[in-house]
């Protein structure tokens, strides 16, 4: 038995981070497709989550990422008030090198074979045009172009939701739901981050950015020459006078190296799985840093793509994403009442909703759908 199988079985059946309902390893030799589809929960409805296309260092790393991301989607969808469970898929490889129409169609066939238990969408390395291709092989595809009945770029409402989370953080900490005059550091100005920068500047914030890709930085500075550029994330998190840190790239941004040197008093960003390991949320609280749980504030995108299944309406989605402000405030209040970090408070609320959905109906009652 290979190490990757041992790792999957341990996580599924013996780890505290397990509990996944199903994990599918997919391979299509003709196209070079290697993918992992992880379904964490369908308690609230069909699992919904994006497809990440990334050159993982190993198959083990890809499986671990799929499992973590799927679990996060269960909590995200629950906190967003969606009737969806959590799932996620990863395609292993450099999308710049191996992504082809044939590979995406092969991937779509694997998703379709699950019969609707998992609904896919965009994520890192996949785009609206890719979902249009996947949809040709799989009806359970969202994040498609408007020309193909979809909602288009879900990054728009993801950024808007993160902005609402920041406003709630400002309200909770400083008594005013505005970022005017606050210094905000955005690490990662790609699909979501560059939209977030626009919201922040419009609200009057002083913005500092960084990204590993010079072209991403250049796009923002060309459009918004007033922003400041930090050399890298390490420099950004040490910026003097930083009020808010917004991790908007890959996960694990909050770790044993970054948290001790972080100058910001609020962390609120779009990246998934920002906490590198259990206990980081307490480290943040011990330093007096307010953490807005990532899967709560970045739910605008999943709200947008979920709406495709009901006939997309942008105004309806934006109104629902606006409620991220109230949800974030409720989490901060619960954390204070229970004497726990906000991340733990969010988990409790999400777990309660999933548990209630699993509760069998009493005789004479209608079943919960």
Image (cartoon, rainbow, N blue to C red):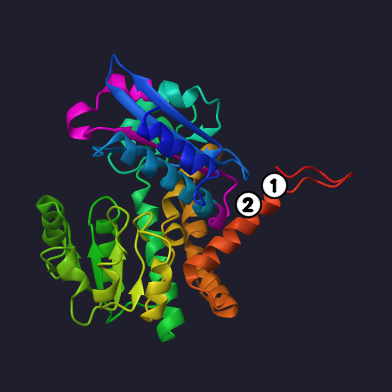
- Picture coordinates of residue 95, whole percent (x, y): 23, 33
Q: Is residue 146 magenta?
A: no
Residue that carries the numbered disc 1 in the rendered image: 358
For the residue labelled by badge 1, is the local secondary structure a helix, a strand or a loop?
helix
Q: Which residues lie in the magenta part?
A: 78-107
- Picture coordinates of residue 118, whole percent (x, y): 51, 34
Q: Residue at x 27, y 82 (%)?
A: 181
Residue sitting at the far top: 30
Dot 2 and dot 1 residues touching (CB under 8 Å): yes
**Foreground residue among 127 and 70:** 70
Q: Is residue 98 magenta?
A: yes
Residue that carries the numbered disc 2 in the rendered image: 354
> What count of labels does the image hold?
2
Q: Is residue 336 visible?
A: yes
**Foreground residue among 164 and 367:** 367
- In the image, taking residue 314 as reference, residue 267 lies left or right, namely left
Q: Is residue 176 visible?
A: no
* Location of residue 368 (image quadrant): top right
* Location of residue 161 (image quadrant): bottom left
CA gap, disc 2 and disc 1: 6 Å
Above or below, comparing residue 90 to residue 245 in the picture:
above
Q: Which part of the image, by quadrant, shows the N terminus?
A: top left
Q: Residue at x 34, y 43 (%)?
A: 123
């Amino acid at each position: 038995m290979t190490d990757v199988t041992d790792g999957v079985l341990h996580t599924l059946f013996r780890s505290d981070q397990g509990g996944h309902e199903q994990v599918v390893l997919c391979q299509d030799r003709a196209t070079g497709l290697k993918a992992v589809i992880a379904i964490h929960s369908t308690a609230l409805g069909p699992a919904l989550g994006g497809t990440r296309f990334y050159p993982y260092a190993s198959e083990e790393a890809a499986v671990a990422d799929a499992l973590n991301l799927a679990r996060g989607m269960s909590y995200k969808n629950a906190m967003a008030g969606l009737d969806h469970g959590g799932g996620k898929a990863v395609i292993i490889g450099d999308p710049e090198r191996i992504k082809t129409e044939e590979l995406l169609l092969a991937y779509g066939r694997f998703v379709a074979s699950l019969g609707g238990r998992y609904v896919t969408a965009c994520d890192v390395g996949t785009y609206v045009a890719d979902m249009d291709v996947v949809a040709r092989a799989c009806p359970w595809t969202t994040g498609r172009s408007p020309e193909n009945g979809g909602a288009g770029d879900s990054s728009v409402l993801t950024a808007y939701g993160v902005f609402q989370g920041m406003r709630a953080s400002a309200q909770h900490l400083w008594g005013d739901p505005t970022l005017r005059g606050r210094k905000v550091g955005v690490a990662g100005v790609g699909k979501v981050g560059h939209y977030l920068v626009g919201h922040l500047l419009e609200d009057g914030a002083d913005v500092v950015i960084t990204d590993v890709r010079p072209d991403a930085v250049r796009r923002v500075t060309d459009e918004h020459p007033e922003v400041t550029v930090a050399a890298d994330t390490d420099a950004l998190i040490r910026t003097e006078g930083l009020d808010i840190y917004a991790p908007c790239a890959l996960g694990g941004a909050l770790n044993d190296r970054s948290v001790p040197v972080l100058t910001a008093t609020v962390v609120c960003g779009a990246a998934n799985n920002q906490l590198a390991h259990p206990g980081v949320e307490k480290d943040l609280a011990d330093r007096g840093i307010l953490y807005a749980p990532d899967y709560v504030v970045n739910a605008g995108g999943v709200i947008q793509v979920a709406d495709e299944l009901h006939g997309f309406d942008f105004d309806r989605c934006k109104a629902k994403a606006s409620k991220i402000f109230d949800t974030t405030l409720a989490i901060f209040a619960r954390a204070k009442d229970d004497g726990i970090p906000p991340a733990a408070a969010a988990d409790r609320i999400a777990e309660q909703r999933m548990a209630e959905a699993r509760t069998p109906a009493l005789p004479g009652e209608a079943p919960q759908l």
